[in-house]
Amino acid sequence: MSNRSITKNTINATNRNETKRSKPKKGSRGLGLGLMLIAASALLLPGLASAGSRFNRGNYDSGDYERPGLYVGGGLVGGFTTRLEGQLTEISGVDNVEVDPSVGLAARVGARLTPHFAVEAHYEWMDDFETSISGVEVAETRTSALTADVKGYLSTGRVQPYLMAGAGFLTARSEDPVSAFRKTDTDFAARFGGGIDFYLNEVVGLSFDTSYVVPTGDVRNLDYVSVGAGVFLRF
């Protein structure tokens, strides 16, 4: 969604709708708190080390969780834009901008190529980033992002944290709820993120992830952060 389109829509909507220090802590108190934290850490470290050892033994059990093969997955996501409010506020006469978070769905199809490496097609649909100016709704924006991602696994046991990066396209469909004006734009986008796969058994698992989608061109103002949870199946 270009700045020119945003400017026209927001100014028209605004014309149609009238609207709507702590004291620093003393040094002795800070020193005392620091000593308490050190003492607490010393007491907790043995227990944490023991728990970590038990986790490692449980994580690297006899399951074949890192085997090569195909997988599919999907789940729910929530997201929020990171720059759109600031971009709109730079427009002369536009104040009190709010962009509500959105919810949506995600789907993945991928291939585990090696124990530490996978590639996947990642689709993410966000239902509605609702934009309001001075309490007046001026735009409803739905996004669809499709990227080809590369995933690097940091562990190969039952619990597998990973990092990912990818590139593809983002489509934004915006509508002015007052005038019913609609606009659709598609442009290149990149994705960066990470997550954790937790295997319930060798076939079924739970996934938790977060990513930052960075679009370009006409949709460059719609970069957003998504957080998701879902399930996956290994073949």
Image (cartoon, helix red, strand yellow):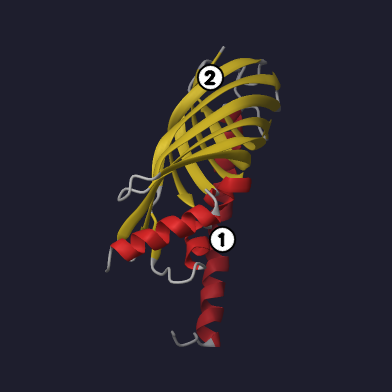
* Residue 213 in the figure: left or right of residue 115: left
User: Please, is residue 83 above or below residue 24 in the view?
Assistant: above
Query: Whole-Å distance between the Cαs marked 2 and 1?
Result: 42 Å
Label 1 secondary element? helix
Quarter of the view holding residue 193 = top right
**Hey, what amino acid is under mark 2?**
Val
The dot on residue 72 is 2
Residue 190: image location, x then y, percent: 64, 41
Badge 2 local density, few (<14 within 10 Å), some, or many (20+)?
A: some
**Hey, what amino acid is under mark 1?**
Ser
User: Please, is residue 217 above or below residue 157 in the view?
Assistant: below
Q: Residue furthest top?
A: 235
Q: Residue at x 71, y 27 (%)?
A: 117
Task: From the image, state whether disc 2 or disc 1 is nearer to you.
Answer: 2
Q: Residue at x 52, y 71 (%)?
A: 36
* Residue 230 in the figure: left or right of residue 223: left
Q: Residue at x 60, y 35 (%)?
A: 169
Location of the C terminus by quadrant is top right
**Earlier sequence position, callout 2 versus callout 1:** 1
Q: How many marks?
A: 2
Q: Residue at x 45, y 57 (%)?
A: 8
Residue 5: image location, x then y, percent: 49, 53
Residue 39: image location, x then y, percent: 55, 66
Residue 12: image location, x then y, percent: 38, 60
Q: Nearer the viewer, residue 7 or 167?
A: 7
* Residue 134 in the figure: left or right of residue 53: left
| Viewer can see residue 82 | no
Badge 1 local density, few (<14 within 10 Å), some, or many (20+)?
A: few
| Viewer can see residue 11 | yes
Give the labeled residue for mark 1: 41
Quarter of the view holding residue 105 = top left
